[in-house]
Image: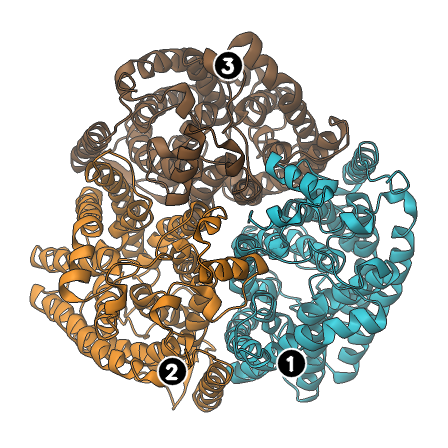
Chain colours: A cyan, B orange, C brown
């Protein structure tokens, strides 16, 4: 396959080191420690006018929870594919490690003091958040892209995200504490737009590697459970300290609990034999965390959060069962992980819930109109940004793998011997053998 | 197997959604955020009369540690069975997600302010605790029950637990900060009583799936290690802030360290070839956390905690080796995960240690008599509650799997292709093949 | 193989229980709770003269992060070998559980109040740290030693470590907040010295079990990602509260991010086909955490940390590719996990960076000369201590496994049936079959 040029020996090192060196130069010029002189709470999610508690480390446990969601949660959630675990957790780490450096720079470029960005724990949380958009989009194109394509996507998506976030949260002052709109819906539709541009007719009928094995499903559950447990931290980390932060924790806790029951119930219902489907459980149980994001710090009461959660769990499961196949066959959107069901629709649901909550006066200084603008802007930036990014990623030079090598770590990774043997067997038509290794 | 009716297509959705809708209605009527007006520290473990620190989020890192124990710790600990990992981690999540909603309601129904339950982080910790009882009992009946049976058990066991807890901790003011008696002994004997009622003569000689494979044992170690690490949080989360909480952390830390050495030593000793047994390591290393629970906040000094830990590690390992087979063959109690050895005996040991410590005056306002009453009450409620619950669970309608389908995810879950193939092979007698997939 | 006497039935129980009983007696004589009367901050890393915040639990979340690094991070990082996962995570736990008890005793024997050691969270963190040295050395001899040998190594290495730490940090007042020198370089060169003494000519040409399988590499990534995420806690846990601690977090965060990109770039570059190597990703991505350790709390600015990280990532990856084979073939140092590349060279780099930073005045009261003495002392104690320990471990009585049983859990563990079957097959020459199980 010479035309595909999937050998990354020069491309990955040149691109990765160039990006890192440029970043270091920019940091040398612009980024310093916070020393407590300036107000540390005027970051990207500028919802607070109060000063934080005196210790600069107050938010550190929250930061670590978010960090775990980004690196373990997203990384392992995507290990469900039988032969794509190295890429899932490994490339997830690469993209997030670059993304957080880039995100911290761009999110704070609008708020410099004396020409400097001062790093605080809160800004590190926001930097981690910015990478979530890319990891969501990664789910849509999982298995069909090269590391170089994905680094380019990281650069462009985080840049687009930071512009939209500054517009929506910074200038419009839209309320989106758990980022249903600015991260989840944005990341999903950005990724779906990229997937549309990278449409592969050759995968119309599926691919033998596009499935799980028993233990890959268990690895994926590590990701699921960590995301599920720490989502209250995601939705509350940058909330106003005090009652609002407590509300964000409580609402997310109950929304997820209700969502889990709805996901199990619906998964069992949509299948003829009434069996649970691991893909639903791995993903739809989390939709309640996405959908309650915008309203998380609002005064919607626990039962309100549970109503949002139960709705999200049902919509998400139904989406996996019925909508994903239609998106692929009718619209040419091949969404590997079903991010439309976990982040797309629940993200929009979250935005709509925020509009309703604003209309009902559940948070001061928030209006339904502004909230609607925030949702529209996030979707608009995602779709346009995703289409342009997809076109750039489509340039053949970046080493996109050919159809037959999709969903296969061995294109970009050394894999242990027995795996290569199977590959050989596959090449030689001895297919039955490979079924025996899990 | 029509008489077993293991198709859950209607039963799981109807039961799960009914429970969730009833819960939401009750929350709409009764549950609101804590806004700091009322005293947040009069929850179920009402051992404190002092007010907490001013921030409502102080206990949040502790809460997350406990959360990890419930969802990762218990969930993965039970993945040791070779073909039951989906159910272990998945149904664990389902039960805990419903259980925490139900537990929060029932634990606080006795302490309402103006007809309302106010949610705090401490109450969320207690709600998580209440689910631990069910997850312990789940271990006793693992592989032999349907999701519907288990949801019924969750409902009934948490209800029984809340009554006993209110009686013992609330009214009698028994000291049980790490809940050796009210959670561990209670959950174990409740589950053993259920297992007794659900006794399966057909499994007298074991079942081919009732064992581990290499990687399932490693998944189980994820659960073990998380439980081991975060047990100090479990035992100290609701302790009196300050010195008592620090004592609870320190005692648990040292008890577990001593217990680990005892478990390794004993495991090696009881086996002819001196080899370590994964089941012992996965479970008996944790017995020190259970056994030091009641005394955790008492003034027993680190060496006292270590003595408790070393005793628990020995008893637990010996139990796995010698007692579990006897319980199954003589008493008809088939205890899949050996919860009697991890939670039952160490829980009683914890209760007894608490009686001794109370007699020695290691904590103010605690008497040996009261402590003994707390232990007796917990055991009584567990056995009676478990027997009644077991009888209800035995009604054939709930989809209990037949003997030959025990310990097998594929009854209630879609499992990846190669697994079903193996199933076929099994059915067709080609058994040797299945040995090759791990 | 009677001469090897790998049956541990008496040796493990006698040694483990003797160590534990002696420890308990010493604790009964010497160790009590901290009750806040004495200054809690004069532990082993005596860099602070200020009093901590009033709550004794302030450092608890940091402690738990470090705890996770020790038990999950180190434990799972070493599960990469295909048939050595039980030992990796299991023996890791055994050594750390004993090591923390022993470390807490020896680290504080120099600082008693009224003949007593008072336990605080900070001392528990330091105790966990002391075990890291052993776990690093464990990586060098992984697969080639018995549990008894390793317990002896734990006892001797932690004792040596505590003497060097007291000398370097306590008396010389060398700055080493993240312990690049006193833990990482020390642990690595101690382990390499032991490995040199235990050199096995029979493994010159490798061993069939000294490699990974697909899922063992994924288990190892659990360890990698947890170490990567929580390293900021490792480097900042005992830093001066306030700005210094914040700096330590920020420097480590950015050093690791830059290091990850460098590791991916270099891994791709050094391989002919440009493919990523899991061993590099699992280890070299972490070198930035090691290398920034000494300087972590110094005023080196984020870009300085990133420069250290990028250098460490390159050096470490190159070391794995080119240096490890040379160490084995020319110097007789068989370094199973490549700890020289992850802890050895990056640890020295960290020490050197500290000397430069001290010379540039990046921290008050720190001089380049003292820093250099700290590095030299750590290396000296490591090499001499390691050689002597290696000689003691070489005594045939301790059950060291023969060459053909290296890297194989089944020598010291019961392993599930299908594994033993494979073993049989191996013995009977039917090798092809074993390739099919992963």
Mark 1 vs mark 3: in front:
3
Label 3, secondary structure: give it.
Answer: loop
* Along the line of sight, the residue nearer the viewer: B36 or B5: B5
Chain on which label 2 sits: B
Q: Residues within 10 Å of mark 1 (few under 14, many from 20)?
A: some
Chain on which label 3 sits: C
Q: Quadrant of residue A241?
A: bottom right
Mark 2 vs mark 3: in front:
2
Mark 1 vs mark 2: in front:
2
Horizontal arrangement in the rendering, residue B421 relative to residue B185 (left or right):
right
Q: Please give the residue where the numbered disc 2 appears in the rendered image.
A: B3
In the image, what residue occupies the spot 71% across and 31% down?
C267
Q: Residue furthest top?
A: C330
* Along the line of sight, the residue nearer the viewer: B309 or B324: B324
Where is the N terminus of chain A found, in terms of image quarters? top right
Q: Please give the residue where the numbered disc 3 appears in the rendered image.
A: C333
In the image, residue C122 sits, relative to residue C365, either above or below, namely below
Q: Position of residue C9 (x, y in %)?
A: 21, 31
In the image, what residue occupies the spot 36% across and 53% down?
B211
Chain on which label 1 sits: A
Q: Are marks 1 and 2 on the same chain?
A: no
Is residue C311 in view from this perspective? yes
In the image, what residue occupies the spot 31% across and 34% down?
C104
Q: CA distance from mark 2 to mark 3?
A: 65 Å
Q: Position of residue C327 (x, y in %)?
A: 56, 13
Q: Please give the residue where the numbered disc 1 appears in the rendered image.
A: A363
Q: Quadrant of residue C217?
A: top right
Q: CA distance from mark 1 to mark 2?
A: 55 Å
Q: Position of residue C276 (x, y in %)?
A: 70, 35
Label 2, secondary structure: give it.
Answer: loop
Circles 2 and 3 in contact, beta carbons < 8 Å:
no
């Amino acid at each position: 396959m010479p035309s595909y040029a999937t050998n990354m020996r020069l491309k990955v090192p040149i691109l990765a080191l160039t990006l890192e060196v440029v970043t270091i130069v920019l940091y040398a010029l612009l980024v310093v420690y916070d020393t407590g002189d300036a107000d540390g709470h005027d970051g990207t999610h500028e919802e607070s006018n109060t000063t934080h508690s005196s210790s600069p480390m107050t938010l550190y446990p929250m930061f670590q929870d978010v960090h775990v969601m980004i690196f373990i949660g997203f990384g392992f959630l995507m290990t469900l594919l039988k032969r794509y675990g190295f890429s899932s957790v490994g490339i997830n780490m690469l993209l997030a490690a670059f993304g957080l450096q880039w995100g911290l720079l761009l999110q704070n470029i609008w708020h410099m003091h004396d020409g400097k960005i001062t790093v605080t724990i809160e800004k590190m949380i926001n930097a981690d958040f910015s990478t979530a958009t890319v990891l969501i989009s990664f789910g849509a194109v999982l298995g069909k892209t090269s590391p170089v394509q994905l680094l380019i996507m990281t650069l462009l998506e985080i840049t687009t995200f930071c512009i939209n976030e500054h517009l929506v949260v910074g200038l419009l002052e839209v309320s989106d504490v758990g980022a249903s709109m600015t991260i989840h819906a944005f990341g999903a539709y950005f990724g779906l737009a990229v997937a549309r541009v990278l449409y592969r007719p050759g995968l119309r009928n599926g691919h033998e590697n596009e499935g799980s094995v028993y233990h890959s499903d268990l690895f994926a559950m590590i990701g699921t459970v960590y995301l599920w447990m720490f989502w209250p931290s995601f939705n509350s980390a940058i909330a106003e300290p005090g009652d609002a932060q407590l509300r964000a924790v409580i609402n997310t806790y109950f929304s997820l609990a209700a969502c889990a029951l709805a996901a199990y119930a619906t998964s069992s219902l949509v299948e003829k034999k009434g069996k649970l489907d691991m893909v639903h459980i791995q993903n739809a149980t989390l939709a309640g965390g996405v959908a309650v994001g915008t309203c998380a710090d609002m005064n919607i009461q626990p039962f309100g959060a549970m109503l949002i959660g139960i709705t999200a769990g049902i919509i998400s499961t139904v989406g996996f069962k019925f909508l994903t196949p239609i998106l692929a066959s009718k619209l040419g959107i091949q969404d590997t992980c079903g991010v439309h069901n976990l982040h797309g629709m629940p993200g929009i649901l979250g935005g709509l819930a925020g509009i309703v909550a604003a209309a009902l006066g559940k948070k001061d200084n928030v209006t339904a109109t502004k909230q609607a603008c925030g949702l529209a802007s996030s979707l608009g930036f995602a779709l346009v940004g995703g289409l342009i990014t997809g076109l750039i990623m489509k340039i053949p030079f970046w080493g996109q793998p050919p159809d037959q090598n999709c969903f296969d770590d061995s294109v970009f990774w050394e894999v242990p011997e027995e795996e290569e043997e199977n590959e050989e067997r596959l090449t030689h038509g001895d297919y039955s053998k490979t079924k025996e290794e899990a």
